[in-house]
Image (spheres, coloured by chain):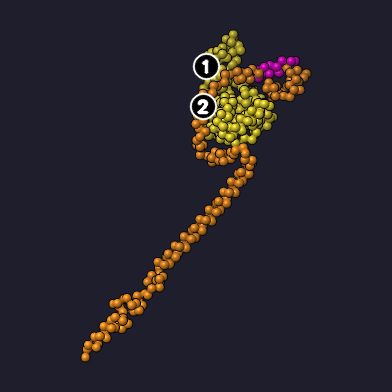
Amino acid sequence: MDEDRTVGRLVREAQGGDRAAIQWIYEEFAPRIHNFLYRMLGSREEAEDVTQQTFLIVIRRLGSLRDAGQLESWIYRIARNEVYQKFRRKKIVREESEHPGSAESPALTEERLHANPERLLLTRELREVLQTTLLGLPLKLREAFVLGVVEEMGYRDVSRITGRSVLSVKTDIYRARMSLKKELRKYLRPVGKAGTGQ
Amino acid sequence: MKRHIPEDRISAWVDRQLDPEAMAQVDAHLRSCAECRSLAEEMSAITEAYRSAEPLDLPPHLWARIASGMNEPPTHGRWSRWLQPLLARPSWVSVPAPALVLMVFIVGTVLFVEFRSASRFEQRALSQIEAAHQAMASLDAEKHNPFHLPAPDDAKVNPFARSSVDPLVNPFSAAQQIRQQERQP
Ligand SMILES: [Zn+2]
């Protein structure tokens, strides 16, 4: 409650143009937005650019935010919108792709992964494998999974951000999970059986 | 034999997004069913893998870039972006966005009509001036002397036009003629 009041006050101050309050909003939400964007876009440079773009829009449109309690999902919605715009501009939106991920996946060969199966879970390559697999998901499933699972948001919040029903969010996350499970099992299976030298 | 838990329900269970009663039901089933438990463990493992992946650090220079961009007007050419600052309003304005859009539309329409009628009026005025100009140019300027001064045809009544004036009506030349007639025998 007290925290909500503080957020409300800071939002009002930011709406009035207070620099410190605006910076507070940035510092509070930018790390998560930046990670969300990285997971959605798969590139550090793009994540950085879109984070900047997102917060410039946030600052410019702050006056239209009526409920300070909705600040977080409002910022996420703006960030998500920028992601979609970026994909639209690139003309590679594949909501229901026939070959999900085939065009987006960087060259990550099985040979390369199997060369050092034991190291996979221990090195930064893990992040690369996870990220590559994630980028193979259609945008719709990817965003549901990133928001609901990785960012640990409630399905209701994910629904608010994506504009889809809670039921649809639940199904999307399930489908994303099954797809990732299948892909990661193919890559990571040797890790579980490292001793067998598969 | 008990029915298995639907897979999407297990997925929601992993995310703790079921209501407490449903959570307890799945808990109970998983204790007794190895098959569902195995799926739940796999789903949890993937979840954990993604959650434990190190987050990307926020570049420290990013705020400076945003702060410097705050003072610049938006650089996007798209009209929707251009409209955004117009639609964004300070919190004290309680006009809902649709009303604002309607207002902008009405004012725009009025200005448009106004502008069109103004330009039509201007065009009509210009064409009338042009017509008058042409009419005047085509007229014999000599005959249509706007100042109503005697035209050359009336030169005889012009007391100053010496050459063409009938000497009889010229008081000066008349006096001279009379004097000449007196001198002659
Ligand atoms: Zn079962």
Relative depth, front residue between A146 and A31: A31
Chain coloured orange: which letter? B
Residue A144 is situated, as x and y percent measured from the top left of the image, at 63, 27
- Say what amino acid the circle numbered 2 marks: Leu
Nearest the eye: A179 or B136 = B136
- Marks 1, 2: nearer the viewer: 2
**Badge count:** 2
Whether residue B174 is visible, yes or no, is: yes
Badge 1 marks a residue whose secondary structure is helix
Q: Give the residue pinned by disc 1.
A: A112
Q: Which mark is residue A173?
A: none
Q: Which residue is mark 2?
A: B62
For the N terminus of chain A, the quadrant is: top right
Residue at x 62%, y 26% (from the top left corner): A147
**Residue for point 58% across, 35% down:** A16
Dominant secondary structure, magenta: helix
Chain A is which colour? yellow
Residue B168 coordinates in the image, percent (x, y): 31, 83
Cβ of mark 1 under 8 Å from ligand 1: the answer is no
Q: Confirm whether the magenta stretch covers residue B41.
A: yes
Q: Are marks 1 and 2 in contact (CB under 8 Å)?
A: no
Tell me which segment is drawn in magenta. Answer: B31-43
- Up-down relation of residue B132 to residue B81 (above or below): below
Residue shown at 29% from the left, 80% from the top: B172
- The residue most toward the top is A195
Which residue is located at x 24 percent, y 87 percent?
A: B181
Mark 2, secondary structure of its residue = helix
Looking at the image, residue B163 lies above or below residue A1: below
